[in-house]
Amino acid sequence: MGTTSSCCASTSPKLRSSARSRCEDPGEEPEEICEEPSYSLQHISDRETGEELNSESNPSDHPRASTLFLSKSQTDIQDKRKRLYVNHHHGSIRNRYSSCSTIYLDDNTVSQPNLKFTIKCVSLAIYYHIKNRDPDGQSLLDIFDEKLHPLSKCEVPVDYDKQNPEQRHIYRFIRTLFSSAHLTAECAIVTLVYLERLLTYAEIDMCPGNWKRIVLGAILLASKVWDDQAVWNVDYCQILKDITVEDMNELEREFLELLQFNINVPSSIYAKYYFDLRLLAETNNLTDPTEALSTDRALRLEAMSRLYEEYKNLSRTPPRRWASVDNLTRRWVPAILS
């Protein structure tokens, strides 16, 4: 096992340098060089560099990397800002602002997002993925091709992969699946994480011919990972009447293999996608559903704040310390002799 002829032998850079110094003897001729045996095993330090670089460039795995949908939406951000500027100065802005007498709050937080608003943001992100895709790097896998695996019995148009869908069509498709399967808003955010992870791992783009099956596979996987009571594949066949269970099973299996079975979504990744979706909504003038602060809700917020303050004060209280024998002071007690 320990000899150089063993198939499991491998050396680190430090051992290789020491072996080279032993082989080079000053008294020998320069022609006699002790060559190091070549091994096909790659050193672990050479493998870690590429993996770290790939993880940092992947937004679905690294919390500091920018999301793909936000990067692709930057091409239209100038037009959106000009439109918002014109609407604001012409008085047609729909946002309501708080005052001293009235406070407006939205029902959308990172722990409990609003379902309708989140689905609108996700559909808008998918719209930018399709609209601003790379025309030269487009790759259409067979499992996601709607021509080979149609979702309905209706005839697929000839130019099905040429016409970009509108944002409202994407929203209607996702809303139908979420409302029928009773999925949550958190599942929509996880769906977008899996979608961009698939695009990065498989090196494909979303186009008019594959976006429906990619979104369906991401929703199918996200509902099973996030929700405790997951929707079965046969239940989606009740929503999409013309699809078979075998097709759903094949779609789920291929999706997992393309993800390399990486279905972990850390809290930092989830929070990054949530706030980037809110930034995308603000840029595209998608307002949150706000309502005036009522008395009941104000009392509930006050009670929650009071509980948080009590918990914070308890955490600041230093733990009780017990005195040891070494720190005890001497106390003289008069003795009573009988």
Image (spheres, rainbow, N blue to C red):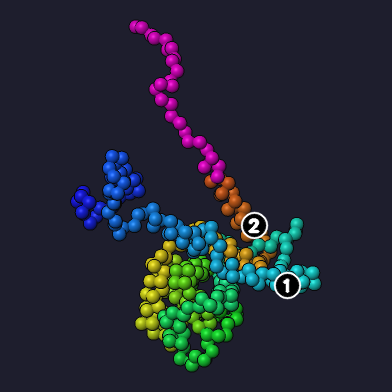
Q: Residue at x 75, y 69 (%)?
A: 85
- Residue 337, percent across and down? 36, 7
Image height check: is 275 above or below 36?
A: below
Which sits in the foreground, 199 or 218? 199
**Three-letter residue code for mark 2:** Ala
Q: Which residue is mark 1?
A: 83
| Residue at numbered disc 2 | 298
Give the spatial CA distance, label 2 vs label 1: 35 Å
Q: How many marks?
A: 2
Whole-percent x, y for residue 38 in the image: 29, 56
- Find numbered disc 2 in the image and state the secondary structure of the residue it sits on: helix
- Within-10-Å neighbours for mark 1: few <14, some 14–19, many 20+: few
Which residue appears at 31% of the width and 40% of the height? 26
- Magenta region: 312-338
**Up-down relation of residue 293 to residue 305 (above or below):** below
Label 1 is placed on what type of residue?
Answer: Arg
Asked whether 314 or 119 is in front, the reply is: 119
